[in-house]
Amino acid sequence: MLTIQLELPLQIGIVQMRTLKIRQDEEPFKQLLNCATRYHSRYSSTPISEIPGVQEARKLFRLLGIEPTKYRPASEALLRRAIKQKPFSSVNNLVDVGNWCALDFLLPNGAYDMQKLEPPIKLRLGLADESYQGLTNQPVHLENRYCLADRKGAFGSPKTDSRRSAINSATTEALIVQYATTDFDTRRLEELTKQFSERILEYCAGEIIGMEIISPK
């Protein structure tokens, strides 16, 4: 079981998986859409800032040095799309499960192709002038912001992940990370990480190598 060296005041839930089958599958995408519909039905007249769970991701972003009302956490961006009934896009079964969990739990997460990474892996501050090409093909600047890094350099963050570590149809091994502040209930994070892994098993097959909650010592 791979672990992550935590150099920052944050806690994370991680799952390592193998023998995954990544493909187009409408079922996890339907689950994402159903989750979006439930949010719209329940909270369409509620200010976003008052929806339970939103402030946790905002607090996390402020730790990253990012103002969350200017640059939205991915979980909140999905929530806003749901509330406004804007369309969602399907990527593949694992990414769709990740987006479903981000919306459902309102915590930032990431899924990374293990075969593209070179351990050891650290969660650390970005170095001077450090950046990578994000999933939107835009540069993501990381100096003094939280990031995941391996021997090659940074590849992920609670803001947006890199193209280098992206999940695609050739992926068979993945590292799943859920981010939370140190104030977030650790037992709840453990429950959500387990639920995330169970959804992957259901829709992407595979097997779990290991699961861990990592908190500052």
Image (spheres, rainbow, N blue to C red):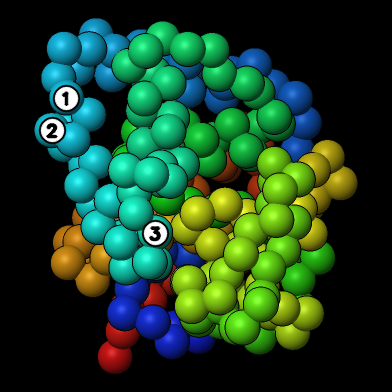
The picture places residue 152, in percent across and down from the top left corner, at: 78, 79
Q: Nearer the viewer, mark 3 or mark 1?
A: 3
Q: Residues within 10 Å of mark 2 (few under 14, many from 20)?
A: few
Q: Residues within 10 Å of mark 1 (few under 14, many from 20)?
A: few
Residue holding disc 3: 66
User: Can residue 166 be seen in this snapshot?
Assistant: no
Callout 2–callout 1 Cβ contact below 8 Å:
yes
Image side of residue 8 versus residue 43, left or right = right
Image quadrant containing the C terminus: bottom left
Cα–Cα span, label 2 and label 3: 20 Å
Q: Residues within 10 Å of mark 3 (few under 14, many from 20)?
A: some
Image side of residue 214 versus residue 25, left or right = left
Image side of residue 43 versus residue 103, left or right = left
Measured along the vertical axis of the image, is residue 105 above or below residue 148? above
User: Can residue 40 be seen in this snapshot?
Assistant: yes
Callout 2–callout 3 Cβ contact below 8 Å:
no
Q: What amino acid type should be assigned to the residue bearing mark 1?
A: Pro
**Nearest the camera: 141 or 160?**
141
Q: Secondary structure at mark 1?
A: loop
Cα–Cα span, label 3 and label 1: 21 Å
Q: What amino acid type should be assigned to the residue bearing mark 2?
A: Glu
**Nearest the camera: 164 or 145?**
145
The picture places residue 195, in percent across and down from the top left corner, at: 39, 45
Q: What amino acid type should be assigned to the residue bearing mark 3?
A: Ile
Cα–Cα span, label 2 and label 1: 5 Å
Residue holding disc 1: 47
Residue at 51% x, 35% y: name it.
99
Residue holding disc 2: 50
N-terminal of the two: label 3 or label 1? 1
